[in-house]
Every structure is written in C-alpha cells, then in structure tokens.
Amino acid sequence: MTDGLEILPVRGIGDVVAGDDLAELITAAAPWLADGDVLVVTSKIVSKAEGRLAEVPADGPAREEARREVLAAETARVVARRGPTTIVQTHHGFVMAAAGIDASNVDKTHLVLLPADPDASARQLRAAFAERGLDVGVIVSDTMGRAWRNGLTDVALGAAGIEPIRDHRGETDPYGNELEITQMAVIDELAAAGELVKGKCDQVPVAVVRGYPRAGIGDSAGASVLLRDAASDMFSLGTAEARAAGLLDAAQLPDGALPGLPIDPAAVDRAAAAVAGLISPAVTVAPAEVVTGSGATAALHLRSRDMTPAGLMRLGADAHRLRAALAAESIVTLSLPHEDGIRLELSGN
Amino acid sequence: MTDGLEILPVRGIGDVVAGDDLAELITAAAPWLADGDVLVVTSKIVSKAEGRLAEVPADGPAREEARREVLAAETARVVARRGPTTIVQTHHGFVMAAAGIDASNVDKTHLVLLPADPDASARQLRAAFAERGLDVGVIVSDTMGRAWRNGLTDVALGAAGIEPIRDHRGETDPYGNELEITQMAVIDELAAAGELVKGKCDQVPVAVVRGYPRAGIGDSAGASVLLRDAASDMFSLGTAEARAAGLLDAAQLPDGALPGLPIDPAAVDRAAAAVAGLISPAVTVAPAEVVTGSGATAALHLRSRDMTPAGLMRLGADAHRLRAALAAESIVTLSLPHEDGIRLELSGN
C-alpha cells in the first residue's frame, strides 16, 4: 500500500460563476499540483461553473413555494418524510435530503442544484487538467446524511481517473481466511478525507490528496457504480413510509391464483397468534383440507357461533385480519366466503 | 482551518493477543508519534488485546450454529434480513451487518467481537499514551456498510481526545446565509481517511492523522454521540420488515377510543380510492353524521345490497380493507357493525 497521504487545501479560488474554467481557477490557486494527485472538488463550484442554479425569490412564502417546485423537479421518488425533512432519490439515483439542493454559498435569489451528471463533470475536469499536462484523478464531492448515524460526511457524487472501489475479493489474510469484507468505497473515503481540510464558509472548495496509489488508471468507472438501486436496497423507503405501504398492502390483498409454494406451519401459527386476542370469541379457526385448484398448499376454515348479520360481518372482518397477519408472514391467501363461514386458501410466496 | 493533513500508516505492529499493551506496541512501531496526532486504531486489534473473542469450531455445521449463537448474543434487535445478510443493532447501538462479528485476521477457531465499550477503549488507550507523555486523540474504527450506497467505509466506533462533531451552527457564509448543513461527523471522516492507508490483510491496523486541529481537547464526548436511536431514525427498520409490520398493524387494528383529531377529507378520498376496485360492487360507502362519544371527527357508513351470509361476510372484510387504507393515511377508525351495515368512526392520529 501507500507510504502515507497528504491532504492539502486549495485556497484562493474565490467566487465561481457560470462559465468559469475550473481547471484554470484550480491550477492558478494550486500551481503545485502534480501528476498522481486526486482532486476532491466540492460539487457546489462544479454546479456554479455549469450554471446549475435555480432562480428563486429572496424570501417570503413565494420563496418556499419556488423551493418546493425546484425540489419536485429534482426528485425521482420520495424516500422518507418527517417534519420539515424530505429525503428523496434524485434522478441521478442519489438518496439525499432535499435532493442536494443548497441555499448556502450562493446569493439569496438562487438555489444551487447538483451537477446534472457528476461523473461527466469529473471526466471533463480531468480532461481539462490533462490538456494542461496533468494526470490527476477527480472526485466531485458533496455532503450527505446517512441512516443510523448522526452527523454528515462528504461522499463522492462523481469520479474520474480513480477506481471507485478497492476490491479485496480473493485475498486471504495471514491466517488463511478468505476476506468477507471485500469492497471498500474508496472514493467516498477520499471525499471524506478531503472534507477535513475544507471549510463550509472558508472558500476552500477543493482539496488535493497526494500519495494515493492510482497509477495506471485511465478512464475508470464513475461514482455511479456506488449507487444502489432501490430494488436491491434493503432501506429503499423510510420505516414510516414502508409501514404505511404495508397497511395499504393489507387494504389491497388480492384474490387470485396462488403461487403454490410450501408453507412453514410455524408461520401460520404465528399469524393466528397475532390476531388471537382481536378476533371475536365466537369465531373459530381450524385447518381444512386443500381441495381446490387455486394453488393452495394449506387451507383454514373460519366459522362463527354468531350467525346474526353483525356476527357475519365481524367474521368477514376477522378473516381479513387473519389474512393480513398471514401476509406479514409472507403467506398469500384467497378468501372464499360461503354459507358456512369463510375458507382461506393459503400458499407460500 | 488546517494547512493540510498527513495520513501515515503504522507498520510492524504484528499479531495482537489478549493482554497486549497496545500503546506499547504502537509506540514501538511508530516512535515518531507526536503531540496532536490522531490515531485511528482498527477495532480488531482493540478487541484482540481485550480478549473479546468467541471460541467456535473451525468448520462444519457446528461452526455455523455457534456463529448464530454469538450473533444472537451480540444483537439488541434485528433491523433487516435478506438472504444470508442480517443487519442488527448491537447492544452498543451500532447498526451493522452480523453485529460487526468478524472471522478475518484471526485463527479459524475464533470470532472477533466488537470491543465491549469502544469509547472506553479509546479513553484508556489515550490515557496510556498520556502516561508516555503523548497527547494524542484516539479513534477506534471499523468497517461498515450503509444504506443506499454500495461499498463499505470505515467509521468511528469509539473516540477520545477529539471532538466527534464539527458544528457549523450559527456560522454564516460569505453571502450572509446561515448554514443549513451544520454538523459534520469528523471522527467518521478521520476513520475513513485512516482506512485509505490501512490494508485489510497487510497488518497495518493503525493510521496516524497529523495536522488535524484538536489542540485544547481534553476528554471529549465519545463516538456514542453519533449513534441515532431507533425512535429518531427514519430508517430504523428494513423496508421489507417495516412493510410486514404495516401488514401486522392492519391485522391488529384496535377498536377503542379515538384521539379526536381533525381529518383531511382528501386523505379519506385517497383511502376510498385505494380500495375502490377491490370492495364488492354491492357495497356502498357514504359519509355519515358523527353522533357517538367515541372521539370521532368523521364517520362513514358501509352498506351492501347483498344481505346474504356471504354478502355480509364480504361487507365485513371490505370494511376492514377500508380501515387499513385509512390507517395508511394515518386515520384511525372504530368499527361498529349493526343490522344495517357497518359504521366506521374516524379520527386523525
């Protein structure tokens, strides 16, 4: 590995406006830049140079309204809301509070949006340095919150000329164990390291990491490889939002063909236990024989000693309670009301 | 801010065993340590020195069984499961895959657990350096996954002699805007920076950060201030787990006094629309007058043209569908079946 790194601030870049040549500004401020350096560039100055600004009123309700509209335009989907906080997934795929829109370090009539394509921004900036004869890696960084831990850290939105991931797969430790922890998000760690020498208000929008081994890296994969898509993300929705989705699932339990997969009897018992105190004392739930061609792999029969209209309606509601509890155990159901009660056909999912 | 940082690897520490004096091992390997340095110490060597190991069979099903038992003992609650991955919250409060239990860099008959109290470990290590006349900050680090982003990064499990958070509250930028992003988790960023010079298999378990301004810091708050408790965490459960919890909520909708809070009529409309295609064509849902002392602020009346036993059971199930859909909109309900149908009393929550 490396003999050590230096993390150096680049001061004196000053205010950046649309159309500015960032490579020019950075090389003027840091004439000591050298081949092999990795530049960590705050996304804000990239956005400003690229004109990624939205005009908004300086204050009042109109500002709030405009801000909401800008947020909606930057949002692909809402991930979670609580109080004034809205966490969204942007069109790029970043999960960030307020879509990364920022009102700091810009005049009061503008909001700064994220760069449209931070990997492309990083590639362009790296190419602009290459034109000056400098072979550097470029990371476009921004500040993000995270689940589970207080406080914010800087991560990489875009990258060029540096491998985003250091992969330990196939390595064995001195004891002969193959490594379990395999993929380090090194560009996020480099962005975090850069943040340590950058101020929020101190006009230090660029840090240089010197000594990180990136020799031989050409046009690498960008930071987008760090984006986990919602389908493979175990935390794609806020807990409250997912819980509400589960309630909606219960409201919309389908009646249709069943997958025909096997069922763990213990899961059925857990579901029955979950509603035991809530269903009518007049209602009984008993295993039934599987007879239909619905794909069921098990069946339950609900009956009630109370066959008055109120008792029958209660039986229907209780059957739906049980269906929801079974769904919570990943068991899908088909409800078949008949004169004698309700037959629930069950299948694994 | 700083003029720049150096991140230096500490090599030659060698294998660490229970009872080892880490301060002794580190100062021997890095005689160049100086006042003001921040040591980033991989939690694994802290655990080994403290004897935080669990004995397990070297292979076979017995090993897997023992590993499951160790995981259960280290787990305060399960956060999410998918396939072979179990993410838990440890008794310390960390949210980590497999409770941070690690089988690498240890012989095959042991697993390494996290230190019992990483902040205490950091304080003790800092005190041991102080006894040698060295005023250093200490971070105990480990590798963690995160939501939304692929790849792992190192974060701080414990800290001493360094402020865990750099707080920008009250600062204004050059444009006069008060900062919105206020609290940087700098010890996590320092841990990440340290990881860049540490190998996973290279026996470089310690990095030194030189030049980070921590002068005047005595016994600071530890890394535990970065732990977000589940109640204030918007991602306290995996999406699938929270969705299952929502299904269970639907199974267990209570019948009791209502909070009496106002309701957004649009939310009622959304709930009705959510079940419109699923409830029986014979069923009608109409607003009703609020008359009871239940705390309801709105009421709905469900009736069916089909008053056969099957029709009445269906009406009961449909009412429960609507209750679940209303609950998804944060509207609580009380179900009152009677001869003429079902009256749902509604309240905000």
Image (cartoon, coloured by chain):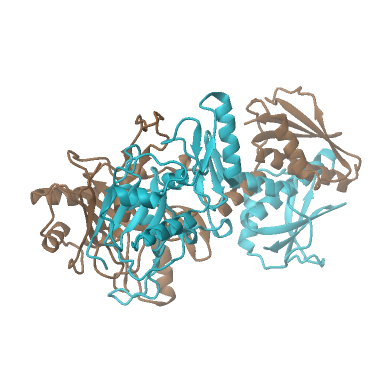
Chain colours: A cyan, B brown
User: As displayed, is residue B228 above or below residue A158?
Assistant: above
* Front in this rendered view, residue B133 or A19: A19
Residue A84 % position (x, y): 52, 33
- How many numbered marks are there? 0
- At 49% from the left edge and 57% from the top edge, which residue is drawn? A120
Is residue B128 visible in the rendered image? The answer is: yes
* Front in this rendered view, residue B347 or A138: A138
* Front in this rendered view, residue B29 or B321: B29
Residue A170 % position (x, y): 39, 76
User: As displayed, is residue B335 above or below residue A303?
Assistant: above
Asked which quadrant contains residue A229, the reply is bottom right
- At 25% from the left edge and 66% from the top edge, which residue is drawn? A2
Quadrant (top left, top right, bottom left, bottom right) of the N terminus of chain A: bottom left
Is residue B152 visible in the rendered image? The answer is: no
- At 80% from the left edge and 43% from the top edge, which residue is drawn? B276
Asked which quadrant contains residue B229, the reply is top left
| Left or right, residue A88 beside residue A14 | right
Residue A110 % position (x, y): 50, 34
Quadrant (top left, top right, bottom left, bottom right) of the C terminus of chain A: bottom right
User: As displayed, is residue A267 above or below residue A202?
Assistant: below
Residue A79 % position (x, y): 56, 46
